[in-house]
Image (spheres, rainbow, N blue to C red):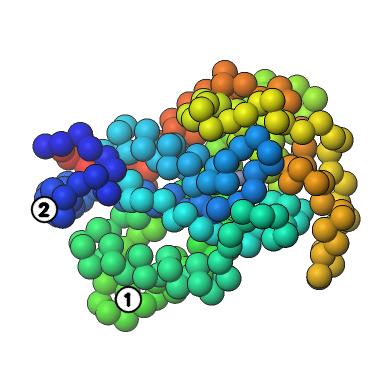
């Protein structure tokens, strides 16, 4: 039995054996290709859930499928908007269709425990819709026992960790885009991809409480980030990551049990 948790590194025969013998959960990170300020890479929203998922899979004897590299559009008040070079997004219907197809394929392999680990805020309701449509379609084909977990990993942040990391108080996850949490977690998992010399210095973004379409790009900070990432450290990243990995592992075992290996 191999300890490999990355599905994409397994042969089809090794994968097939794992699925048939162990009935593992399969974690699917759902990211985006989106600007994350001048200091973080475009794939941040895929890299973070992929790194967390790999650790969770090691603790829960699960598998991790390759991350969905593209996500739903970046919204001005949570991801800076669609006008940044590099931000490369899908229409909602495309993302839903892609995820539905993927659920159907895993069902065909015999997988019955799936977990979408969302890394991009704007993906949330499209993942929800894909789960609903996919389960409905599977029932029509006689598959009644597929279960899908949907996780927005940042929701596992405890008040205790938040207090340590944001001593001045936590604002909102939307304003945290490329902020302290994502920057710190990236410093923890992928320090070589972070350039702290490029962290912009400007006051937090101020947005209206409504949206106007088309939106005014002048109301979005030039840098693409909404709050400062000054003060992000690998140490804070480890605090976040340890908590996410532990709590997500607990949730996987709670919902799916631990497969025998
Ligand atoms: Zn992000
Ligand atoms: Mn994002």
**Residue that badge 1 annotates:** 139
Q: Secondary structure at mark 2?
A: helix
Residue at (27, 79) in percent of width and height: 141
Residue at the limit of the structure toward the bottom, as seen here: 140
* Helix, strand or loop at mark 1: helix
Dot 1 surroundings within 10 Å: few (below 14), some, or many (20 or more)?
few
Question: Which is in the foreground here, disc 1 or disc 2?
Answer: 2
Question: Tag on residue 116?
Answer: none
Name the mark on residue 13: 2
Residue 230 sits in which quadrant?
top right
Residue 102 appears left or right of 37: left
Q: Position of residue 134 (x, y in %)?
A: 39, 71
Residue under the point 47% across and 54% down: 69
The crowding category of the residue bearing disc 2, from other C-alpha atoms within 10 Å (few below 14, some 14 to 19, many at least 20), is few
At horizontal 69% and vertical 41% (from top left) the residue drawn is: 37
Vertical relation: 81 (above or below) 240 = below
Q: Is residue 258 visible?
A: no
């Amino acid at each position: 039995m191999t300890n490999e948790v990355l599905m994409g590194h397994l042969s089809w025969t090794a994968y097939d054996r794992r699925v048939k013998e162990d009935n593992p959960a399969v974690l699917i990170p759902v990211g985006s290709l989106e600007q994350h300020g001048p200091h973080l890479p475009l794939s941040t929203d895929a890299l973070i859930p992929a790194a967390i998922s790999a650790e969770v899979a090691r603790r829960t004897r699960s598998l991790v499928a390759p991350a969905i590299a593209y996500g739903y559009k970046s919204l001005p008040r949570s991801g800076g908007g669609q006008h940044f070079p590099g931000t490369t997004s899908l229409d909602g219907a495309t993302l839903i269709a892609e995820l539905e197809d993927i659920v159907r394929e895993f069902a065909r392999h015999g997988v019955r425990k799936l977990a979408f680990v969302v890394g991009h805020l704007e993906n949330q309701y499209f993942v929800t819709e894909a789960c609903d449509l996919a389960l409905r379609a599977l029932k029509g084909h006689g598959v009644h026992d597929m279960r899908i977990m949907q996780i927005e990993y940042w929701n596992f942040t405890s008040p205790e960790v938040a207090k340590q990391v944001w001593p001045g108080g936590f604002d909102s996850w939307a304003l945290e885009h490329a902020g302290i949490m994502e920057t710190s977690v990236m410093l923890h998992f992928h320090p070589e991809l972070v350039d702290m010399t490029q962290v912009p210095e400007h006051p937090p973004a101020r947005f209206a409480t409504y949206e106007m379409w088309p939106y005014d790009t002048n109301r979005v900070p030039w840098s693409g980030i909404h709050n400062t990432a000054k003060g992000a450290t690998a140490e804070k990243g480890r605090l976040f990551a340890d908590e996410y990995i532990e709590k997500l592992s607990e949730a996987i075992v709670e919902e799916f049990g631990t497969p025998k290996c």
